[in-house]
Each structure stands twice: as structure tokens, then as C-alpha cells.
Image: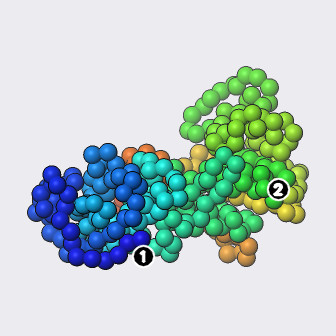
């Protein structure tokens, strides 16, 4: 779909060599010309008033000049390669009938920015297909996680907020239920308050625990129509329950997900993992930077990773802030908190080293 050619003149109305949204004068090291066969699809790729090109230039540090059905990409070689990856991936999505959305654009940028030599082309990343639609990987970390979900019986997913740990696990569970590969879905969470005391909650048992399980309901409702969710819950095909309700059970032919696993104790974690029966898949998700257990209590997730990570048949996906798919600001917030935490750890190690050397710092 793309081929190399000499640099082309930019379209009318833009000075030669000047990108859609950046001032002239930026040095370029390489120029690549891409050819697009469908002008209607190319118009969608460019966006109204070239706004998609402006975003790609700003994010990837390249110059983009379009005339007719050809586009010249100029910049440092690694930046040009990243832009080619993003542009060809987005164009192929349009060829396949998928819409050109802001989310698709940001995903292409995120994938191209962080993977100059990716294992798979953007359009060939794995996807989860449910009757509600296709859930596609938004990063290469998510792609690796989705492959684990498809191929492993037990998967641990660890990473910061917004990286799709629970969302993708629920999508895989729904896909397997709808295809008949499992008979039911079991979703569970420990009922732990996130740093605040909620006090007495009124109502029956379901009404008391539902606030803790709301994120799981939200994910389910994105994968299936609400009436279908309620019907399957009434028949027992979908069960959402606090972790305490898992004791003494054996889960056969089920897809079981334990969310917020960082807030389990080692005893609770072992109890959940040993519920696995014939034909069952298990996914354990959590963020070790958001432990809400009482001070001094060991996280069951951390304990499990240290104990069974190398056991054959268990896969571990470690997602990073760059795999985040919420608002771009969320990724920057997470990165800022992690940088501050890393600084505190360095200071703590430095103080310990000073004390060990008798306060001399030598």
C-alpha cells in the first residue's frame, strides 16, 4: 500500500516543506512518500482541515505534506518509520470499514511512538470478538495480554489504572461464554474500602456488596446489552460476588475473574486460585501501587507473584503506564506519581546507606 519515492511538493496553501501544524525550519533527515489508492478514504485519514495530520505531526515529530493521493513524510529516520506505521495502520482500518475516530488516532500514535520495530503490524494485532462488537488491542502490551487470555488457563495481569486489565478480561470472558467455550462467568472482588470508611450500608446482602462490584457491572454492560446481562445473571450464567463467597466452591467450565487482587491477603488468594476446576479459565488483575489493606498486611497478589509466577501454565502480563487507554492526562498523572514514588525510594535507600556507614555517607 505504501512505496518509497522522492519527496513531493506539499499541497497548495502551505509553504513548501512546512507541516500542517508546525513552523518551518525543523531539520529533516529522511523523506518517505506514501501512496494511497482511495482519495475518499485519504480524506477521512487527513481529517477536517487536516486536523489528524496536525496531531500526528505534533505527536510523532515529523512533517507531513499531502498532494493528491500521495503523502510525503519527513523527519528523523526513526520518527519517519513511526509515522509510516501509524498512517498505514489507520488507512488499513479505513479500508476494513472501521471509523476514523479520535480514539483510533490516539491508539495509532501510542503504538507507533513506543514500538519502532513492533512484533506485529498495527492492523494485525489480536482482537476479542463479542456479539456487541470487536475489542481491539490499544497497545502492544495489551496485545501480549490478549494473547495470554486466549491461550493460557490462568493469567495474572498487573499494572496501573487505565491499562485495560479488567476490561479485556471481561471481554474475553463474554466472548468465550457467547461462543459456548465456557458455561458461565464468575466475577469477584475483595470488599475493601479504598482509603475511607463507608460505615454501615443499608439493604440486603446484594445491595451491601454491589458498590464494591460496580466496575465489574460497568464492564459487562459495555460487552452485552443490559437486558441480556440481567437475564444471564438471573439464570446463573453470570455471577458477580465478593471474594468471601468463593470459599468451599469448585468452579468448573467457568471463566473466573478476580479483580483488585492487590487487596486480597495471601490466604484469600490461595483460596481463590484453588477453586479452579475442569475446563475453567482464571484471570487475576491488580495494581500493586494501590493496596488498601491495613498497614503491615501482605498483599495476596504480591505474595502469589513471588510464589507461583514460574509455575508452568501460568502467564503474567505486566502492563505499563504507556498501555493506558483512558484520557491522555491519566497516563501523565500515573507517570508523575510513579516518578515521585521512585524518588522517595532512592532517598530511602540513600538514608539507609548513610546509617550503615556510621552517618559518614561514605
Where does label 1 land, which residue? 117
Q: Quadrant of the N terminus?
A: bottom left
Q: Is residue 135 visible?
A: yes
Q: Position of residue 240 (x, y in %)?
A: 76, 42
> Which residue occupies the extreme top position in the image?
202
Horizontal side of residue 30 vs 130, given as left or right: left
Residue at image point 49% right, 59% down: 95
In-front residue for pair 218/248: 218
Q: Residue at x 67, y 75 (%)?
A: 310
| Residue pictured at 70% horizontal, 42% vertical | 224
Q: Looking at the picture, how far across and down is residue 308, in whole percent?
A: 70, 70
Color style of the picture: rainbow
Query: In the figure, residue 89 lies in which quadrant?
Result: bottom left
Placement of the C terminus among the 4 image quadrants: bottom left
Residue 283 — which label? none
Which residue has dot 2 on it?
180
Image marks 1 and 2: residues in contact by CB distance under 8 Å = no
Between residue 65 and residue 340, name the one nearer to us: 65
Q: Residue at x 70, y 25 (%)?
A: 201
* Residue 46, position as x, y percentages in the image: 33, 53
The Cα atoms of the two marked residues, 1 and 2, are separated by: 37 Å
Residue 190 x/y as whole percent: 70, 45
- The answer to whether residue 149 is left or right of residue 138 is right
Whether residue 39 sits left or right of residue 54 in the image: it is right
Q: Secondary structure at mark 2?
A: loop
Of callouts 1 and 2, the N-terminal one: 1
Please tell me in which quadrant of the rendered image residue 208 appears.
top right
What is the crowding at mark 2: few (fewer than 14 residues within 10 Å), some, or many (at least 20)? few
Q: Nearer the viewer, mark 1 or mark 2?
A: 2
Is residue 258 in view from this perspective? no
Label 1 Cα crowd, 10 Å radius (few <14 / some 14-19 / many 20+): few
Amino acid at each position: 500500500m505504501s512505496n518509497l519515492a522522492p519527496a513531493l511538493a506539499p499541497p497548495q496553501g502551505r509553504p513548501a516543506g512546512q507541516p500542517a501544524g508546525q513552523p518551518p525550519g525543523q531539520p529533516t533527515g529522511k523523506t518517505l512518500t506514501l501512496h494511497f489508492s482511495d482519495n475518499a478514504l485519504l480524506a477521512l485519514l487527513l481529517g477536517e482541515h487536516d486536523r489528524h495530520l496536525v496531531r500526528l505531526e505534533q505527536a510523532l515529530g515529523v512533517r507531513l505534506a499531502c498532494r493528491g493521493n500521495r503523502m510525503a513524510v519527513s523527519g528523523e529516520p526513526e520518527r519517519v518509520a513511526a509515522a509510516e506505521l501509524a498512517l498505514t495502520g489507520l488507512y488499513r482500518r479505513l479500508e476494513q470499514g472501521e471509523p476514523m475516530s479520535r480514539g483510533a488516532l490516539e491508539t495509532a500514535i501510542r503504538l507507533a511512538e513506543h514500538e519502532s520495530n513492533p512484533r506485529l503490524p498495527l492492523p494485525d494485532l489480536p482482537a476479542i470478538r463479542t456479539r456487541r462488537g470487536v475489542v481491539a488491542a490499544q497497545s502492544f502490551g495489551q496485545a501480549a495480554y490478549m494473547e495470554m487470555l486466549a491461550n493460557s488457563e490462568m493469567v495474572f495481569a498487573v499494572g496501573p489504572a487505565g491499562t485495560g486489565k479488567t476490561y479485556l478480561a471481561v471481554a474475553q470472558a463474554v466472548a468465550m461464554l457467547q461462543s459456548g467455550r465456557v458455561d458461565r462467568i464468575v466475577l469477584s472482588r475483595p470488599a475493601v474500602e479504598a482509603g475511607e470508611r463507608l460505615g454501615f450500608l443499608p439493604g440486603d446482602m446484594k445491595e451491601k456488596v454491589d458498590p464494591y462490584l460496580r466496575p465489574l457491572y460497568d464492564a459487562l454492560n459495555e460487552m452485552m446489552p443490559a437486558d441480556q446481562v440481567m437475564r444471564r445473571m438471573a439464570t446463573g450464567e453470570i455471577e458477580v460476588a465478593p471474594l468471601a463467597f468463593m470459599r468451599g466452591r469448585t468452579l468448573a467450565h467457568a471463566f473466573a475473574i478476580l479483580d483488585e487482587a492487590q487487596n486480597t491477603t495471601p490466604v484469600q488468594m490461595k483460596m481463590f486460585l484453588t477453586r479452579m476446576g475442569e475446563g475453567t479459565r482464571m484471570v487475576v488483575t491488580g495494581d500493586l501501587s494501590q493496596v488498601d489493606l491495613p498497614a503491615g498486611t501482605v498483599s495476596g497478589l504480591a505474595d502469589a507473584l513471588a510464589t507461583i509466577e514460574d509455575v508452568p501454565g501460568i502467564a503474567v502480563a505486566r502492563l505499563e503506564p504507556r498501555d493506558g487507554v483512558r484520557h491522555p492526562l491519566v497516563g501523565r498523572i500515573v507517570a508523575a506519581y510513579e516518578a515521585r514514588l521512585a524518588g522517595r525510594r532512592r532517598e530511602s535507600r540513600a538514608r539507609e546507606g548513610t546509617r550503615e556507614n556510621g552517618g559518614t555517607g561514605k
